[in-house]
Image: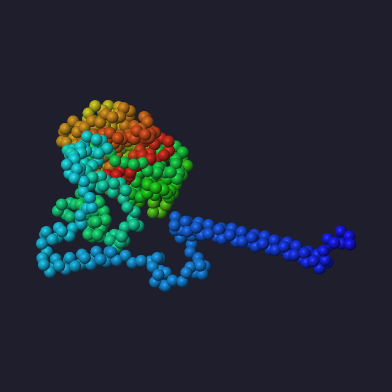
């Protein structure tokens, strides 16, 4: 037997070994597949857990808006629990408020059974959590610092206590940052009777302070004087969006005026357009514009009754715009007169008469109803300015002779004539709404303020002479309560001054130092005093909010 034959294996053993080798290969492949599936399952499970953690984190940070609940998907994953345990985490009842209320009810019942003495009532009052003892001992001089002068309630007030200083700061914050109307509870139900007036003390209860709960919700003063006086020195104001922001003029603004409803404002200029805006201080929506082809507008004015607008320029005629019918009528030339220009005029407070400045010192009186000339008045010098007084029964005029004339329109005669002190050529006149004062401006920039009764009585000395302007006075205007007089000159930039009439002093923080008014040409105050509009030569109507006045 050969060596090969001796070492040879049987055939059946060879087949068996081959099968075992193949089985080992298949087992290895199966193990690899199982490991791969297991690894893939672990990765998928890890991804699911990461997604779930991310959803929980988003739900914790941003709420259900970014992670909306999916009902029915997580029920299988959660362990079965009782219904009470399931919803206990989502909802709970806070019974502390009821306990506190019950305590107060019990105390109230005990007090009602025993007595209602003053000491027991004080014991039930709510006390602050913490009180700073140093506030009572500290003192603040609010007259020494300029930015604190607005906290004064009287002109001579200077030092107040620390607690009073804190309360006034809070009241000032509430005044400058009023709450939104939609956030006030039951505002519409109490809108008709939210203001109550005490005739004896002339005081007005603040809005929304009739109910005890409303009083506890605000830090405003419970009683506000209806005729609050404006303090001198510092004027509180803020700049708003330009009144004509939606349609600026292409030329200088010659006239701005508020309608008597305080929401409508007209702006007219040399670009021959008359524009109307609805003033809210935010958008100032444009309502309408009218174009006059043959008349650059030098002056435009509402009739005091609000029915018409009178427009004029350097023409022999003028225009009347009817606000009700929305029609424009051309009037003139005036019969019996050969006037080259009707650019300057004034409307009487009773809406019955229009007074135009004519040639050679003539004053032309035109009826607002018939638009016809009803009379003329003649002064010695050339006429430059006009102003009505006594509800339209008297008329003031001034001009080149440096004198101020008082005319009685009932008798069509001159009732008084007096020299304006230091004036050579008068350029502007203005009377206060009550008729107690009038101001006269000249081409030298001097403005004299007179008491009208004293002037008519023969006293020639003005109450105050304002010398803050250095160029010709072009325009003057009192506000509705005669506490502010605005004077301006169009020949110098930012040449606009506001005068505090009770003290006859100029407000130190006006005009604004950080912005320019350009060349101011006209001014007007809203009927309630809350808004002030300034038209300038750049075609803009600047709008300001005066914080002392609550209503527009």
Question: Left or right of 73: which side holds 318?
Answer: left
Image x and y of residue 541, in percent: 39, 40
Residue drawn where x is 41% and y is 39% of the image: 540
Q: Looking at this view, is 444 or 51 the one in front?
A: 51
Image x and y of residue 474, in percent: 33, 33
Q: How many marks?
A: 0
Q: Looking at this view, is 73 or 401 the one in front?
A: 73
Q: In the orientation shown, which residue stands out farthest toward the bottom?
A: 82
Q: Is residue 127 visible?
A: yes
The colour scheme of the drawn protein is rainbow
Q: Looking at this view, is 445 or 33 the one in front?
A: 33
Residue drawn where x is 51% and y is 67% of the image: 77
Residue drawn where x is 25% and y is 58% of the image: 214
Image x and y of residue 500, in percent: 24, 37
Q: In the orientation shown, which residue stands out farthest toward the right?
A: 1
Question: Left or right of 67: which side holds 236?
Answer: left
Q: In the orientation shown, which residue stands out farthest toward the front?
A: 1
Q: Quadrant of the N terminus?
A: bottom right
Q: Is residue 499 visible?
A: no
Residue drawn where x is 30% and y is 61% of the image: 186
Image x and y of residue 63, in percent: 44, 58
Name which quarter of the figure residue 28 lies in: bottom right
Question: Left or right of 472: which side holds 59?
Answer: right
Q: Looking at this view, is 440 or 489 the one in front?
A: 489
Name which quarter of the figure residue 148 lies in: top left
């Amino acid at each position: 037997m050969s060596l090969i034959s001796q070492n040879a294996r049987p055939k059946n053993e060879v087949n068996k070994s081959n099968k075992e080798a193949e089985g080992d290969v298949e087992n290895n492949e199966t193990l690899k597949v199982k490991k791969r599936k297991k690894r893939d399952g672990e990765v998928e499970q890890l991804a699911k857990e990461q997604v779930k953690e991310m959803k929980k984190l988003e739900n914790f940070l941003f709420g259900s808006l970014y992670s909306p609940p999916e009902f029915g998907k997580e029920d299988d994953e959660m362990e079965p629990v009782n219904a009470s345990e399931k919803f206990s985490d989502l909802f709970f009842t806070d019974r502390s408020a009821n306990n506190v209320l019950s305590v107060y009810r019990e105390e109230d019942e005990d007090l009602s059974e025993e007595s209602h003495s003053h000491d027991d009532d004080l014991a039930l009052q709510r006390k602050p959590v913490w009180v700073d003892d140093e506030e009572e001992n500290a003192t603040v001089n609010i007259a020494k610092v300029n930015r604190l002068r607005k906290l004064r309630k009287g002109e001579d007030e200077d030092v107040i206590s620390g607690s009073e200083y804190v309360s006034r700061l809070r009241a000032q914050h509430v005044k400058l940052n009023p709450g939104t109307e939609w956030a006030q509870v039951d505002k519409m139900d109490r809108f008709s009777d939210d203001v109550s007036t005490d005739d004896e003390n002339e005081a007005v209860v603040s809005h929304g302070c009739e109910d005890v709960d409303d009083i506890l919700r605000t830090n405003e003063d419970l009683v506000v004087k209806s005729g609050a006086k404006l303090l001198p020195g510092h004027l509180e104001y803020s700049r708003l969006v330009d009144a004509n922001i939606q349609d600026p003029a292409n030329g200088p603004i010659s006239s701005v005026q508020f309608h008597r409803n305080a929401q409508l404002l007209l702006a007219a200029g040399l670009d021959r357009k008359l524009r109307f805006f609805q003033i809210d201080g935010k958008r100032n929506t444009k309502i309408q514009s009218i174009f006059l082809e043959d008349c650059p507008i030098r002056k435009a004015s509402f009739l005091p009754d609000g029915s018409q607008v009178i427009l004029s320029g350097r023409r022999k005629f003028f225009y009347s715009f009817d606000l009700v019918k929305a029609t424009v009528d051309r009037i003139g030339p005036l019969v019996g007169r050969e006037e080259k220009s009707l650019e300057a005029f004034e409307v009487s407070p009773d809406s019955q008469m229009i007074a135009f400045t004519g040639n050679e010192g003539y004053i032309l009186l035109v009826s607002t109803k018939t638009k016809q000339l009803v009379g003329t008045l003649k002064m010695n010098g050339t006429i430059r300015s006009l102003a009505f007084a006594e509800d339209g029964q008297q008329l003031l005029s001034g001009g080149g002779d440096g004198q101020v004339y008082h005319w009685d329109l009932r008798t069509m005669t001159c009732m008084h004539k007096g020299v304006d002190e230091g004036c050579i050529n008068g350029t502007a006149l203005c009377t206060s709404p009550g008729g107690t004062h009038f101001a006269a401006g000249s081409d030298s920039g001097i403005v004299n303020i007179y008491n009208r009764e004293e002037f008519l009585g023969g006293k020639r000395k003005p109450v105050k002479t304002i010398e803050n302007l250095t160029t010709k006075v072009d325009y003057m205007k009192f506000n509705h309560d005669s506490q502010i007089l605005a004077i301006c000159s169009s020949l110098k930039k930012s040449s606009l001054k506001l005068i505090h009439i009770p003290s006859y002093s100029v407000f130190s923080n006006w005009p604004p130092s950080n912005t320019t008014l350009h060349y101011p040409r006209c001014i007007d105050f809203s009927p309630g005093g809350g808004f002030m509009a300034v038209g300038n030569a750049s075609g803009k109507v600047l709008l300001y909010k005066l914080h002392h006045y609550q209503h527009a």
